[in-house]
Image: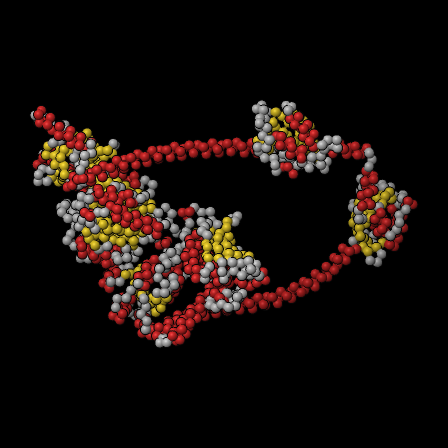
Amino acid sequence: MTRLDHIQSNAHRKADDLVLSCVVPLSNAAPLDAVYIAFAGHDLAQVFLFMSPGPDFDALNARAAELFDDCCVASCTTAGEIGPKGYTEGHIMAVGLPRDSFATKSVPIPDLNELSAQDLCDEMVQTRLSLAQANPDKPNGFAFLLVDGLSMKEDELASIITPALGPLPLFGGSAGDGDRFERTQVACAGETFETGAVVTFVYTDCETRVFSLNHLVPTDQRMVVTEADPENRVVKSINAEPAAREYARIVGKDPNQLDEFTFAAHPVVVRFGDTHHVRAIQRVNERGELVFFSAIDEGMVLTVADAQGIASHLDAELEALSRDTAPATILGCDCILRRIEAEQTQATRAVSDVLARHHVVGFSTYGEQIGPMHVNHTMTGVALYPPKARPV
Amino acid sequence: MQLIDPSDTIERQNAKLIKITEALMRRVEQKTEQSGLAYAQFERAALLEAQVRQRTQDLERTLDLLHDSNAQLAVANRETEAARSNLAEAIETVDEGFALFDAQDLLVMSNSRFCKDLSDIKASIQPGLAFKSYVDLIGSSRFLSLPAVENRATWTQKRMQRHTDNHVVFNVSLVWDRWLQVSEHRTASGGTVILQTDVTGIMRLERRERAKLMDRQAKMVRATLDHINQGVCIFGHDGRLVGWNMQMETLLNLPIDENVVGLEFAALVDRLGDQFDYSGTVSRAGLLAWAEKRTGRRPLTFEVDHGKDRVLSVFAQEMPDRGFVISFTDVTAEREAARALREMNETLERRVEERTLELGDALAEARRANASKTRFVAAASHDLLQPLSAAKLFVSSLEDRATDDLSREVAGKAVSALASVEGIIEALLDISKLDSGQASMNIQPVRLGSILTSLRDELTPSAGFRGLDLHIVDSSVVVRSDAVFLRRILQNLVSNALRYTAHGKVLVGVRRTDNGARIEVHDTGPGIALADQRTVFQEFKQLSPNRSGANGLGLGLAIVERACQSLGHPLALRSEPGQGCCFSVTVDCVQADVHDVIDTSPDTRLARPKAEGVMVLLVENDAEVARAITLMIEDWGSHVVHASSGEEALDLLDEIEIVPDGFLLDYQLGDGMQGTDLLARLRTRYGKVPARIISADRTPDLLKACIDLKVKLIPKPLNPARISRFLDAAAT
């Protein structure tokens, strides 16, 4: 029958084309056109754009929406991109999910300051159920969150939407602004948001594994937050001393020379039983207080943690994900603090090599979400494996 | 580093410790204000996460344990099963019937020889049978033969009494003079082993000895001789007649009285005189010479003519006492019949030969006719389809422009008539393909469920329109077939059922058979008389004459029959007038892992757009590609106007004066303008019309050109889902 030759069948699918990705310099005259050309010929369900921050974010997203008008587009600004050669900067990292294997829906949340928990939950549940019902051939899935990185609303958002996701695991990353911490943005279908988020539901016939990893080991150095402004994630005093000075004393540093490198080298964590979660310090403010990346409160006990070798730890963790089958691609959100730590320990090249070898694509974040939690100094992501039985 | 700076004064340290304690206490008491909500949420999430992880680990450990013990259980079960089957094999090799009852007198096991002569109760001998029941069964068997003095109840009672002994051996008499020796032993654990030995041979031998003594043999021989249908005479070792039977007298028409006893063989032959004509292999002299030999005669068979019209077969054989026996069989009728058969056979062979030659000619003739018919139909159908599509367009444009209702109605009828003609030609094309063996079958595992689901979606509306209830029962069966043709077969059967059923319902279901599945289509229609059941599968045959259109011509079932034949699926029809019909197709099943099964791909049906009746202008210079796209889109219920170059497309649009709903433009159109140029021309004429460029070319140049023109590129080979979405987009 002639139609077999001219009309594409499922057999057309190749493992190489399971997930598409391309990286284009932000300086390119028409970077989105270049992405479009690179992805041409594929019927895409979803495009993710991790874009180095720049003045053209709005225009670029408008162009993306124009070019990719028959699929979902979700994007955010980054604190660096992760591409085929590992860490990079000043680029647009584009990831495309073809319809053969993926069915997706991106739901914008335009303003995190006006969250209505009930409405948001309803919308999430409806979107998830209708997508799942329409795609019985794609039984696996996850939800991917891109959220404003300076909104301080990540904890609240993650804990609101997680119950509505049912069996879908959630992971995500906070949009970044290089190392400036001034303006982070997300966009969905060409519309950009200043304090917003995008939740993308992904159903697929690929095998998936959502993971979260960190390379920190808590020590027995502890301190108590005695005064705080939880609303603004500011710790005012620790152990009844001004916060920055006391932190410096505990980690044995000069209080006047605290910077992001110190914070990366001496992270603090909170412990619950035998688990720990990083509470990363963003900066010291003019009053000698510590500004955090994630939720804090008075009376919490902070434990100083030691870092293991970041590159070898990452390699071991990603290798574990490849134990039975190697994933075709890993979509990852990697904390900016890890990148800073890698730079500080001269491990950037080594980490980049590990990321490249394991086909990680993604971006450097101001924070990571895993399930209902917002954390720092971790890498979260999803490993996408080829479907178990591929129709021939 | 210590919590408190040791260089502070004691007072300062104390004050700080108090503050720390207060902060901790507030935290413990959870006096968090609204401002601490975010951290509280985080803390709750983290604690829950830890609990969930712990539970998951516990669960996994439990599952592992369960898995292990299941595995051990499976091994133990296998061993038990092996031991059991060894034992069963061992007792099966024993020549006697064997049965083992446990200490509770319940049957544990028995071999196939046990009670095999008592066939009426054999089936009841099953493990778990109580010993008392076993004895009752034997007592009630009609094969048990009891002495006249004993009745069944007392036999049973006695048998049970003997069971109390530790070791018992006794004989049981069965009907037809068969005997069983039964021995019963108590085992160490209080169970009972029963052995049944067939002693019939021994018993009969004993009796035969007795019979000899009673000298009944002679009488029996006499009775036997008189009973058989042959004439027999027996001569002693001295060549004198010692016995004959009554048949002998009849055959020879000669009463043999006592006087002839003791007559010599030669004298007897003389007496028979001319009655026998030794026309066969043995002459009279030869026969006499054979009888003369006193020993070492070989058996002799020959035929003689007796009188004018009878033939006797004679068989002479020496007996152990050197006497001999001669038998005469009247074979007149057999010889007659054989001769008649021989003659008839010769005539028939001659006729068969003549007829074979005639048939050979006719076959060659038929082949020529069929081949030219197939060629004609294929060519005609192909050539007719193109002008027909054009005619459809012209008439529909006429319909649009008609000013009065009557013209519109006439044009409308013309459109539907043309659509029918198109349907007929396509059906003919299918039949000619199937007949000529050109239809290529792609046999592979096919999920019946997905075909049934799509049929339900497709045909439910039309059933509803006719006021019929269409019920298609789901099935998870995976069969070996060609997905496209199997669907076509079922579609035709269901459409056919819907068409001929005035009211009631149509039911489609799948029944599992031994190694296949039977797909059945039932209806509550008028049914088909036995005499008409062959006819319905012929093309252009239909039972109800008041129908029109392609399927109304009766091509549907003709396609079904041919496709089933090509696929090797047996097709059956069960019906009686007034009782509805059941058409069934039997297909082989595949015992496949669910993952290995191929869904019907490329499945243009899954990609089916919501929109129907969309008119698409396809500009494509490769005729085969154009045909493939056209088939797909028309299958979806939309229309395609095809032009093979940009110039031709523009002319065609001038001519028909209709703006299609969408445009599919090949990029490379031979020598003429390119697809992108054509699109620019179309945009100047009609504004921003829905369009797609199709091309196997994916060079950045073409992609840039498409970006500049703001048109999407669909790469070849075409993805049906994208064409489908384009149709939906064009429809709005």
In the rendered view, would you say B229 is above or below B353?
A: above
In the rendered view, would you say B120 is above or below A6?
A: above
Q: Quadrant of the N terminus of chain B?
A: top left
Q: Position of residue A178 (x, y in %)?
A: 16, 46
State which quadrant residue A340 falls in.
top left
Residue B146 in view here: yes
In the rendered view, would you say B372 is above or below A10?
A: below
Q: Nearer the viewer, residue B188 or A31?
A: B188
Q: Position of residue A240 (x, y in %)?
A: 11, 31
- In the shown orientation, is residue B670 left or right of residue B105? left
State which quadrant residue A239 falls in.
top left
Name the residue furthest right: B259
- Point 83% across, 39% down: residue: B218
- Point 51% across, 33% down: residue: B81
Q: Nearer the viewer, residue A53 or B226?
A: A53
Q: Position of residue A12 (x, y in %)?
A: 35, 54
- In the shown orientation, is residue B19 left or right of residue B568? left
Residue B295 in view here: no
- Point 84% across, 55% down: residue: B306
- Point 24% across, 37% down: residue: B44
Q: Position of residue B717 (x, y in %)?
A: 34, 59
Q: Nearer the viewer, residue A229 or B67?
A: A229
In the rendered view, would you say B579 is above or below B358?
A: above
Q: Quadrant of the C terminus of chain B?
A: bottom left
Which color scheme is applied? secondary structure
**Total of numbered circles in the picture?**
0
Q: Nearer the viewer, residue A98 or B146?
A: B146
